[in-house]
Amino acid sequence: MSSTTFSDRDLAQVERANAGGRTPVVFIHGLWLLPTSWDRWAGVFEEAGFAAVTPGWPDDPETVAEAKAHPEVFAHKTVGQVADHYAELIGRLERRPALVGHSFGGLLTQILAGRGLACASVAIDPAPFQGVLPLPVSSLRAAAPVLANPANVHRAVPLTYDQFRYSFANAVSEDEARELYETFCVPAPGAPLFQAAVANFNPWSETKVDSTAGDRGPLLLISGERDNTVPWAITNASYKKQARNEHHTTEIVEMPGRGHSLTIDSGWREVCDTALAFIKRFL
C-alpha cells in the first residue's frame, strides 16, 4: 500500500462524499498537472448529482506556484505506488466510485478498474498499458524531454513552453497555449514514462492492466484527434484489448480537432459532458 499519507483536502473530500450519500466520482490527473486541473469538471459532476473527489498523487502540492518552487516532491513516484495510493483512498469511500482519468491518470483509471474498484470508468488519452504495442513518432518526441536522459528516472522533470506546446497544446492558439502553460503545467516524475517505455519487455511491469476482469465495470476511452502524446493508434490499441472483456461495455470515441490538453483547454466542457453522459448511462 501507499507509504504516504493523504492530504487534509483529500480526506475532507472523502468524508464529504460519504456523508452526502451520493455516488462518488474520483478524478485522476496525469503527469505535469495537479488535481486543481479538474476543478471545473468537479463542478459539472456535482451539479449532475455526483460527489466529486479530486485527490492528488502522493505529496502533490496544493498550488502550481508551490509545485514550481519545490519540484523535488514529484521525484521517485512510480505507477504502482500511485495506483496503490489511489486504491487506498478509494477504499475509504463507502460507495464504489466512478473513475475519470487523463493521460497517466487514464492508465491508473484502467489499473484500478481492473482491480474491481470502479462502477464505471472514463480514460481520456490514456498512457499505454503493458501489451499496447503502437509507438508513434509523435509519442516518442513528446516523451523525449524525459527519456533522453536516463538519470531522469529518479528526477522531477519540468517542461519548457515549447515542449508543452508540442505535447499538450498543439491544437489551440498560441495565446491559449501560453495561458495553459502558466496556469496548469508543473514538474512531473520521470519514472512513469520510463516504466511505460519498457513495459513490453518487463513481465512484472507496474503498467499491467487486467482488461478482462469480471468486475471491471463499463469503460469509455476518449481520444483527441490531434493528440501528439497519446495518438489514436495508442488509444485504439488499448480499446481493442479492453474490448475483449466479456462482462462489461467497452466504448471509444474520438474528439475531432483536440490535442492532449483537451481536459483543460477552452473545449473542456465537450469532453466533460461526453464523460458525464457515459457514466450516467450506467448509474
Image (cartoon, helix red, strand yellow):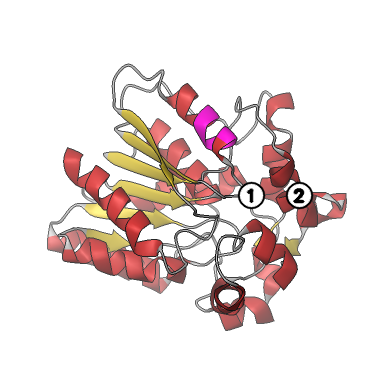
Q: Is residue 205 left or right of residue 26?
A: right
- SS at badge 2: helix
Neighbor class of circle 1 (other Cα within 10 Å; few <14, some 14-19, many 20+) is: many
Between marks 1 and 2, how big is the CA–CA gap? 8 Å
The span picked out in magenta is 233-237
Q: Residue at x 43, y 26 (%)?
A: 242
Residue 188 percent across, percent down from the top left: 66, 62
Seen from the viewer's position, the closer of residues 184 and 56 is 184
Image location (x, y in percent) of residue 138: 71, 45
Kind of residue indicated by mark 2: Arg
Query: Horizontal and vertical percent for residue 72?
Result: 71, 70
Query: Given contact means CB atoms under 8 Å apart, are the residues at marks 1 and 2 in contact?
Result: yes
Residue 97: percent from the left, percent from the top?
Answer: 27, 47
Q: Which mark is residue 141?
A: 2
Name the residue that disc number 1 marks. Answer: 228
In the image, residue 35 lies in the stretch drawn in magenta: no
Could you classify mark 2 by the number of other residues whose Cα lies within 10 Å: few (under 14), some (14-19), or many (20 or more)? some
* Residue at the image point whose x is 45% and y is 64% from the top: 6
- Residue 61 makes an appearance in the image: yes
